[in-house]
Image (tube, rainbow, N blue to C red):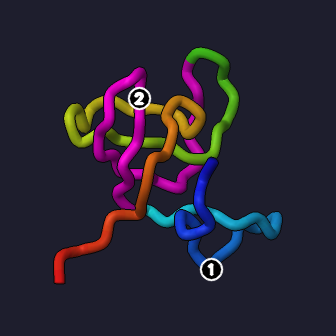
Amino acid sequence: MMSEKLFVDHYSQRGEMIMASRYYWVDYKGSKEIALFLPEVVEDLTTGEEVFGMWRMTSNPEEVLFINEVQILSGPLLPPQ
């Protein structure tokens, strides 16, 4: 389950909380990785549907995953002090 700290104090046009465009620790197919979340509307090329939110994995920045394909473990990551 996602922690409330994953959300920021701004909202979509429908009044829903949205996640920040930042880096998070995620689990993707059993692999724990750092990924960048991008709060954008993108087209799912297999279904033609517009989907909100995508991930770019740091291990393979060319790979784009949809929001429901990963499990958030923690984040957003904080910059060093």
Question: Measured along the vertical axis of the image, is residue 9 above or below residue 20?
Answer: below
Q: Position of residue 3 (x, y in %)?
A: 59, 60
Magenta-colored span: 22-45
- Number of labels in the image equals 2
Front in this rendered view, residue 13 or 67:
67
Q: Position of residue 15 (x, y in %)?
A: 80, 69
User: Are dots 1 and 2 in contact, CB under 8 Å?
Assistant: no
Front in this rendered view, residue 29 or 68:
29
Which amino acid type is shown beneath numbered disc 2? Tyr
| Residue at the right extreme, as displayed | 14
Main SS of residues in magenta: strand
Residue occupied by mark 1: 9
Task: Name the residue at 45% across, 53% down.
Answer: 38
Task: Name the residue at 40% across, 42% down.
Answer: 26
Front in this rendered view, residue 73 or 35:
73
Which amino acid type is shown beneath numbered disc 1? Asp
